[in-house]
Amino acid sequence: MTMIASLLVALVAALHLYFLVLEMFFWTRPLGRKVFRLEPEFAEASKTLAANQGLYNGFLAAGLVWGLCLGEARIQLFFLGCVLVAGLFGAATVGRKILYVQALPALLAIGALLMR
């Protein structure tokens, strides 16, 4: 179960690195606009806010990687909890898809960590 937990934490970290790249570097480009279903005008007007979101996603990924490198479950659980709360809030305020893309992977990783 330890290997599964580590893989799930790494998956959540990788997802948040992907979100960082999308939000900081591809928000106004075709890939970012497609993923987030953005009109070009809105993407351009909101790119600074998106970059800020991306930075926060990077901090979440960094915290998860830090916890993995130290082998410290408490650090991993803290950052997974942050991801879970952000995912639940995003699902409630932005769209249900966030529940499956962000909150569910975090919840699965939390469960795997607690079961090891």
Image (tube, rainbow, N blue to C red):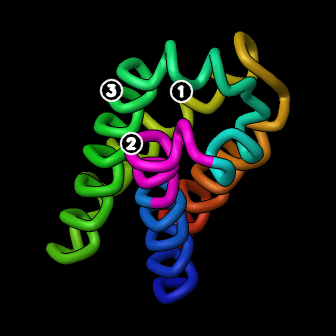
Q: Which residue is mark 2?
A: 24
Q: Residue at x 51, y 80 (%)?
A: 7
Q: How many marks?
A: 3
Q: Position of residue 89 (x, y in %)?
A: 62, 18
Which badge, 3 or 1, comes first in the chain's sequence?
3
User: What whole-number distance in Å separates the C-alpha atoms at marks 3 and 1?
Assistant: 18 Å
The region drawn magenta spans 18-29
Q: Residues within 10 Å of mark 3 (few under 14, many from 20)?
A: some
Q: Type of residue at label 2?
A: Met
User: What whole-number distance in Å separates the C-alpha atoms at marks 2 and 3?
Assistant: 8 Å
Q: Position of residue 108 (x, y in %)?
A: 66, 58
Q: Residue at x 76, y 45 (%)?
A: 34
Q: Which mark is residue 85?
A: 1
Q: Residues within 10 Å of mark 2 (few under 14, many from 20)?
A: many
Which badge, 1 or 2, comes first in the chain's sequence?
2
Are dots 2 and 3 in contact, CB under 8 Å? Answer: no
Q: Residue at x 55, y 37 (%)?
A: 28
Q: Type of residue at label 1?
A: Val
Which badge, 2 or 3, comes first in the chain's sequence?
2
Q: Position of residue 5 (x, y in %)?
A: 51, 75
Give the residue furthest to the left.
70
Q: Position of residue 90 (x, y in %)?
A: 65, 22
Mark 1 residue element: helix
Say above or below: 64 vs 86.
below
Q: Quadrant of residue 73?
A: bottom left
Say which of 92 and 51 sits in front. 51
Residue 99: say if magenta: no
Give the residue furthest to the bottom.
3
Which quadrant of the rendered structure holds the N terminus? bottom right
Q: Which residue is mark 3?
A: 52
